[in-house]
Amino acid sequence: MLTLESVSKRFGGLTAVRAVSLEVREHDLVGIIGPNGAGKTTLFNVISGYFRPEEGRVVFAGRDVTGWAPHDVCRLGLTRTFQIVKPFGNLSVIDNVMIGSLTRVTSVRTARADAERVVETCGLAPYASARAKALPIALRKRLEVARALATRPRLLLLDEVMAGLNPTELGGLVDLIRRLHAEGLTLIVIEHIMAAMMRLAQRIVVLHHGEKIAEGAPAQIVGDRRVVDAYLGEEFVLAQA
Amino acid sequence: MTALSRHAGALVLFGAAAVVPLVVRDAFFLDSLVLILLWGALSAAWNLAGGYAGQVSIGHASFFGIGAYAGAIMVTRFHQGPWLGMLLGVAISIVAGLVLGFLSNRLKGPYFALSTIALSQVLLIAVSRWRGFTAGGEGIPVPFRPGFATLGLGHVAWVYLALAVAILYYGAEMYLERSRIGYQLAGVREDEDAAEAIGIATRKLKVIAITVSAALTSVCGTLWAQYIGFVDPAYVFSVDLSVRFALNSIIGGLGTALGPYLGSILITLLETYLRATFSGLKTGFTGLYLVIYGAALILVVRWVREGLTGIAARLRVRMAGGARGARAHA
């Protein structure tokens, strides 16, 4: 479904992403982890069209989308969320989500009905008419997911939607992502919270200094020497044992 | 909200404007009314780009001037009707609007605003220098030829013409607010990156909004020139004028259909009153009206951020909330 062929992105002298290749198949749930500055978000920006890579190709749904505008990538079925959430602050929750629906349907009435379903799915129904900027962070993260879902993506890229949530909120979001996956959605998830990642991902990709240093099943990854050195640390391994 | 209550403000406002000429024949009063409606419509045109799309321009006098000059030159130099000039003005403004739209995709926020000022200044200089064609800085008196085709109308007819334009612009924005493109524009205004991520062609949408806004501004520019009967570059391309379009909307309520008209009423009346009271030889404080005018604007912008329509909405919410609260306690 999505193929990255040796993608590199440089900012001046700094190589943020170096020759990363990745294959995501239909119905995968792939996790991306790595220390701060490893290039995770940059990789998302390249995939979703915000950055044009200096080298390599991004192929989605059989089309070479390298250098496409983000809105065209979205219309092809690939939607991303932002790590620093970007709600339409002065609009209501339902309007936020409805603007996503309007990418797929032209009728405002149909879009509103669609949006109501998505809002319900994401557990935002009680806040449907609240202004987005009045929501606490946990709900704003959910809104970010809801708005992306409303565009009916085939592949959803979630950038740290769980960061900064308390355990209850976290559990709710993990359940939501699992449910979406069970319904047939393909996902790539960037996350720092290893516990959540272990429960969620079928496959984990580890980035370090812009390079992919490991890829495999969660159990495999936590045992990988290079991953422990670069990211997890000895204490994590001891805690797991 | 029912359709009636959505349009209640507009019904009162435009209804009053329609009735006044039947009752009042005072030329000064009718003149103020024409100007309130024209400034309101101009501000509504500005609001399309500045309010709905969030592309704040301080150079909309460019399109106003293009419309004004297109009409005046068409009449005086080519001996055609002003309506043809209006059409030509719209065509030129669309081209200039596309240029500005392109700039909006390169420059953000204050940088975009500055580039819009630059556009109006370039036009000001060009029209001032091109004496052979535009009569330069002296300006062009537009002859009064009675008739609708020549826009040689009396005060009462002007009120109704300006009112028709005002209602048309208001209706268009009211429709826009509930339309697909209106919601998408709101997304662009709130956060361009997020809008782009959910499939909105943000660049194209901004260009469309700015270009339509330019065309609507140009139409009013032509009307204004025919109404006043004189155009000169220093006024029609001035930053003052651009600021006025923006201010009416900001004070009335950005990105609302009625806001520009409310702002226009307040500003136009305030200006007229202050000028009449505090200027002239008798008072000995020539220019004091500008100080008071400026101070009043600061107060509004400082304490009534959401504009007049914002106050109305807040009152409505408070009243509805009060009613709900009472029911909960019952």
Image (spheres, rainbow, N blue to C red):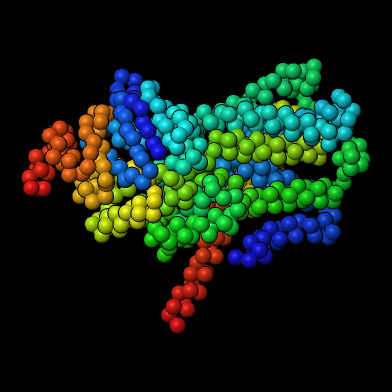
**Residue A237 falls left or right of residue A38:** left
- Measuring from the top left, give residue A40's x and y in whole percent: 30, 35
Give the answer, above or below, for where B106 lies relative to A221.
above
Residue visible at 60% across and 46% down in the picture: B181
The quadrant of the image that shows the N terminus of chain A is: top left
User: B242 or B86, which is in the foreground?
Assistant: B86
- Measuring from the top left, give residue A67's x and y in whole percent: 46, 28
Give the answer, above or below, for where B316 lies relative to B143.
below
Give the answer, above or below, for where A102 lies relative to A220.
below
User: B157 or A136, which is in the foreground?
Assistant: A136
Outermost residue to the bottom: B330
User: B138 or B168, which is in the foreground?
Assistant: B168
- Measuring from the top left, give residue B246's x and y in whole percent: 60, 41
**Residue A193 falls left or right of residue B262:** left
Residue visible at 39% across and 51% down in the picture: A184
Give the answer, above or below, for where B44 lies relative to A176.
above
Residue A195 in sight from this viewpoint: yes
User: A20 or A167, which is in the foreground?
Assistant: A20
Q: Quadrant of residue B208?
A: top right
Residue visible at 71% across and 61% down in the picture: B11
Residue visible at 44% across and 58% down in the picture: A119
